[in-house]
Amino acid sequence: MRVLVISDVHGNAPALEAVLAEPHDVLVCLGDVVGYGPEPGTCLRRVGDTAELLLRGNHDHALATGAPPGCRANFRWLADSTAALGLAQVSATARAALGAFPTHACQVLAGVNCFFVHVTPRDPLYRYLSADPAAWADEVEQLAADIVFVGHTHLQFQLAVAGRTLVNPGSVGQPKDGDPRAAYALLEDGTIRLRRVAYPVECTVAALERSGVDPQAAATLSALLRTRRAPG
């Protein structure tokens, strides 16, 4: 069984399609399908139609409930500038369903006990932890899982923590590590593979420019898509 684990699509349909082209038997999404990108409705429908498990991230929660997204200050204005896209493209019924998605899950997949969450087990929506094993130890040591999958930071990594493997597949739609490709993870035969795939970035940029969002926000988001570096 090949399990494709993705996170942080953020309304980037071309990046999502490039990742979904990876052969797989099961799709798991760790959340944040919406926010920032120009096509949240398309992405939510595509993931919703194909995922075995779809978790709720902080931007999904914000669209569903109207709560603040809880993102870092240098990204909050970008989230606010693109929030109207989610409201326009995702129906009230779909937003209500999005708000009911779980924030975490335990499943046995490919013969492995897995724990899935958007952020951390103790704070599934908002906390920010870097790729520091010491910082993660208290979060995972009580989990009955062999592999813990997390998202949220848009940074791809794999760590050994408290006798478990901690995996962040990175971001499909908005990586922040300087790599110009969409990020994801594969679980097969108990082995994790962190992978990247190129996609037509300029198609996403063009969609942003057509979306009607604030031009400064569109320009900032486009620069992030092209360089994969977060604004200061």
Image (spheres, rainbow, N blue to C red):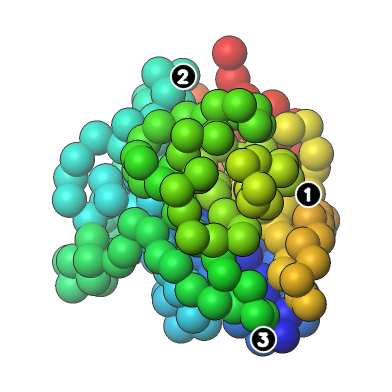
The percent position of residue 57, horizontal first and vertical second, equals 39, 51
Regarding mark 2 in the picture, which secondary structure is present there? helix
Q: Are marks 3 and 1 in contact (CB under 8 Å)?
A: no
What is the crowding at mark 3: few (fewer than 14 residues within 10 Å), some, or many (at least 20)?
Answer: few
What residue is at 78 percent from the left and 55 percent from the top?
A: 194
Closer to viewer: mark 3 or mark 1: 3
> Can see residue 170?
no
Earlier sequence position, callout 3 versus callout 1: 3
Residue located beneath label 3 in the image: 25
- Compared with 108, 229 (above or below) is above
What residue is at 47 percent from the left and 34 percent from the top?
A: 138
What is the crowding at mark 2: few (fewer than 14 residues within 10 Å), some, or many (at least 20)?
Answer: few
Real-space CA distance between mark 1 and mark 2, rounded to the nearest whole angstrom: 22 Å
Residue located beneath label 2 in the image: 74
Indicate the quadrant where residue 176 lies.
top right
What residue is at 78 percent from the left and 49 percent from the top?
A: 181
What is the crowding at mark 1: few (fewer than 14 residues within 10 Å), some, or many (at least 20)?
Answer: many
Closer to the camera, 1 or 230?
1
Real-space CA distance between mark 3 and mark 2, rounded to the nearest whole angstrom: 38 Å
Hey, what amino acid is under mark 2? Asn
Q: Are marks 1 and 2 in contact (CB under 8 Å)?
A: no
Regarding mark 1 in the picture, which secondary structure is present there? loop
What residue is at 36 percent from the left and 41 percent from the top?
A: 122
Q: Tag on residue 181?
A: 1
Q: Tag on residue 217?
A: none
Hey, what amino acid is under mark 3? Asp
Specify the quadrant that holds the C terminus. top right
